[in-house]
Image (cartoon, rainbow, N blue to C red):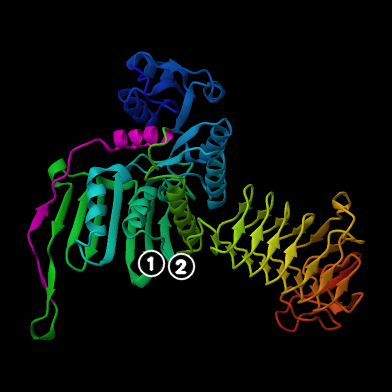
């Protein structure tokens, strides 16, 4: 029976996990329809839950104006595309974990949802488990003392997948709980995996997460274990807590008052009795579905919203990178947000990538796009409608005007100047005469240099301090003077090349070509 006081939800994917979403949303009186790639599966849901409609396609659901939100329970590799389509159709989205298969995709979805004013929520169901909610409260209240270590084990025999490895299938739950308890992302991670069933698809993964102050978390996941184990252990200075989701309800959360005594200056472990923590029995998935419904109604922000999902995705991607590199530790910075100093002004309609920092008194105007990991110094003006790539560094007192495009890894020295018209007059408006300027990847522009509009600065070129560029610049060219002329070539590492075009600093070898210089293969 539908409840008139609640927004309607449609479920896309009614199989292994989707059927549980159908059941819980139905009990909450919020299901309008269901779609599954198997018409028989969808029909079975409609038979089991009277009143539910079966949709003929995903598009039928997305075009249904009576549906406010969709719940996606489809393979992980489809999450990005389906979530993007649903958001574009104006639907709130609850998507099964993980949010996407890369941080770039996840960031795009989070930005899109926020720009459209829509709820984006990730199915990190254990965030809504009463035992975990209570554990999080105990940690926050200092009941365990300062947290030292966390151990998480998620083992079972099956369900074995081929489209994603066990890290992406199992570990999102554990990573979500750990960063939720510590309210932080790790500073570095490492992971090892083994593939025995399907070549290249890890069946078991052991991971280490290192946080600030050397707090460590160990995550072990496997779908080749003879018995089921879902256990989270939190070791604090005063107490230890164990959340065992396979235990009977009264025993799911235990506290241990274990202590270390020091008789004769030697550590001795003193075990304390286990204490069952009383928690109210409730189905986590129902709580999560209600969380989504209330968020769609504007009543709250869900605990596992898109930003939380992106933090988890950031950790998973770093763990995957470590695993592919044989367990090599990977540094990790929580780049789910950019930083802007309180004195900076960011207009509406601006896109700014993760990890970017914008400092004192800077102004980013509407329509501008700034990539990830950029740094904008004091009193920098960008736009309107300027385009800046990833890893760009802009020093103090620089204006990047409309029509200027900076590709990745460009450096702009302090007080250098871009122009946008060639013959400015104070009393004549020439906005329709703007000329474009393109600065290609890796180029460096020195302090107080001037770049006259309408030209292209080649990749990895180097513009000397105070130079005035009045023509196109070849790749790798060293330009100095007014007007600027070429005075040699520069390596990608920034060192001037000798006549033999072999860098004395890094050993790269170059050769001349029609457009200037290029790396010799």
Is residue 274 magenta-colored?
Answer: yes
Residue 443, placed above or below residue 92: below
Q: In the image, residue 60 lies at what x, y percent? A: 55, 20
Q: In the image, residue 182 lies at what x, y percent? A: 33, 60
Of label 1 and label 2, which has the lower sequence position? 1
Mark 1 falls on what kind of element? Answer: strand
Q: How many C-alpha atoms fall within 10 Å of the one at disc 1: few (<14), some, or many (≥20)? A: many
In which quarter of the view is residue 443 placed?
bottom right
Relative placement, left or right, of 52 versus 495 is: left
**Residue designated by label 1:** 210
Hey, which residue is sitting farthest bottom in the picture?
264
Q: How far apart are marks 1 and 2 (CA)?
A: 10 Å
Residue shown at 21% from the left, 44% from the top: 246
Q: How many C-alpha atoms fall within 10 Å of the one at disc 2: few (<14), some, or many (≥20)? A: some
Relative placement, left or right, of 101 versus 304 is: right
Q: In the image, residue 161 lies at what x, y percent? A: 43, 41
* Nearest the eye: 216 or 293: 293
Residue shown at 42% from the left, 64% from the top: 190
Span shown in magenta: 268-296
Is residue 258 magenta-colored?
Answer: no
Mark 2 falls on what kind of element? Answer: loop
User: Which part of the image, by quadrant, shows the C terminus?
Assistant: bottom right
**Residue designated by label 2:** 329
In which quarter of the view is residue 227 placed?
top left
User: How many numbered marks have been drawn onto this rendered protein structure?
Assistant: 2
The mark found on residue 266 in the picture is none
User: Which part of the image, by quadrant, shows the N terminus?
Assistant: top left
Q: In the image, residue 315 lies at what x, y percent? A: 45, 57
Residue 159, placed above or below residue 58: below
Asked if the residue under mark 2 is in contact with the one under mark 1, i.e. CB atoms within 8 Å, the reply is: yes
Q: Nearer the viewer, mark 1 or mark 2?
A: 1
Residue shown at 75% from the left, 84% from the top: 504
């Amino acid at each position: 029976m539908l409840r008139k006081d609640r927004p309607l939800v449609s479920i896309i994917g009614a199989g292994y996990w989707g059927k549980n979403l159908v059941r819980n949303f139905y009990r909450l009186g919020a299901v309008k329809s269901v779609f599954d790639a198997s018409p028989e599966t969808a029909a079975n849901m409609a038979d089991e839950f009277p009143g539910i409609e079966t949709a003929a396609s995903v598009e039928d659901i997305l075009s249904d104006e009576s549906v406010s939100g969709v719940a996606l329970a489809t393979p992980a590799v489809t999450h990005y595309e389906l979530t993007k389509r649903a958001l574009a159709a104006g639907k709130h989205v609850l998507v099964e974990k993980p949010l996407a298969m890369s941080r770039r995709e996840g960031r795009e979805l989070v930005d899109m949802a926020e720009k459209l004013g829509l709820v984006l929520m990730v199915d990190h169901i254990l965030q809504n488990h009463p035992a975990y909610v209570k554990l999080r409260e105990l940690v926050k209240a200092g009941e365990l003392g300062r947290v030292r270590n966390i151990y998480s084990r998620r083992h079972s025999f099956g369900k074995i997948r081929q489209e994603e490895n066990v890290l992406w299938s199992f570990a999102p739950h554990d990573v979500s709980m750990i960063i939720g308890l510590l309210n932080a992302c790790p500073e570095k991670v490492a992971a090892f995996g083994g593939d025995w069933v399907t070549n290249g698809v890890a069946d078991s993964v052991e991971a280490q997460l290192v946080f600030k102050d050397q707090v460590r978390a160990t995550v072990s996941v496997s779908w080749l274990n003879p018995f089921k184990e879902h256990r989270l252990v939190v070791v604090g200075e005063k107490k230890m807590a164990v959340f065992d989701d396979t235990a009977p309800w009264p025993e799911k959360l235990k506290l241990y008052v274990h202590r270390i005594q020091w008789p004769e200056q030697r550590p001795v472990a003193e075990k304390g009795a286990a204490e069952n923590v009383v928690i109210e029995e409730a189905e986590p998935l129902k709580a999560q579905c209600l969380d989504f419904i209330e968020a769609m109604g504007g009543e709250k922000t869900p605990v596992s919203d898109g930003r939380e999902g992106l933090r988890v995705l950031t950790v998973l991607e770093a763990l995957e990178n470590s695993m592919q590199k044989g367990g090599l530790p990977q540094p990790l910075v929580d780049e789910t947000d950019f930083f802007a100093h309180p004195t900076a002004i960011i207009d509406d309609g601006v896109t700014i990538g993760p990890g970017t920092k914008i400092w004192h008194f800077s102004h980013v105007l509407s329509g501008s796009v700034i990539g990830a990991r950029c740094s904008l110094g004091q009193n920098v003006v960008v736009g309107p409608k300027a385009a800046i790539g990833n890893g760009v560094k802009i020093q103090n007192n620089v204006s990047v005007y409309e029509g200027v495009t900076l590709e990745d890894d460009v450096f702009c020295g302090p007080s250098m100047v871009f122009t946008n018209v060639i013959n400015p007059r104070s009393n004549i408006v020439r906005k329709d005469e703007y000329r474009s300027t393109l600065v290609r990847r890796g180029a460096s522009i020195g302090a107080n240099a001037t770049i006259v509009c309408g030209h292209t600065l080649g990749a990895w070129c180097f513009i000397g301090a105070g130079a005035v560029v009045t023509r196109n610049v070849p790749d790798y060219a060293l330009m100095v003077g007014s007007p600027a002329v070429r005075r040699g070539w520069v390596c990608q590492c920034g060192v001037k090349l000798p006549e033999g075009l072999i860098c004395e600093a890094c050993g790269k070898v170059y050769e001349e070509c029609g457009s200037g210089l290029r790396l010799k293969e």
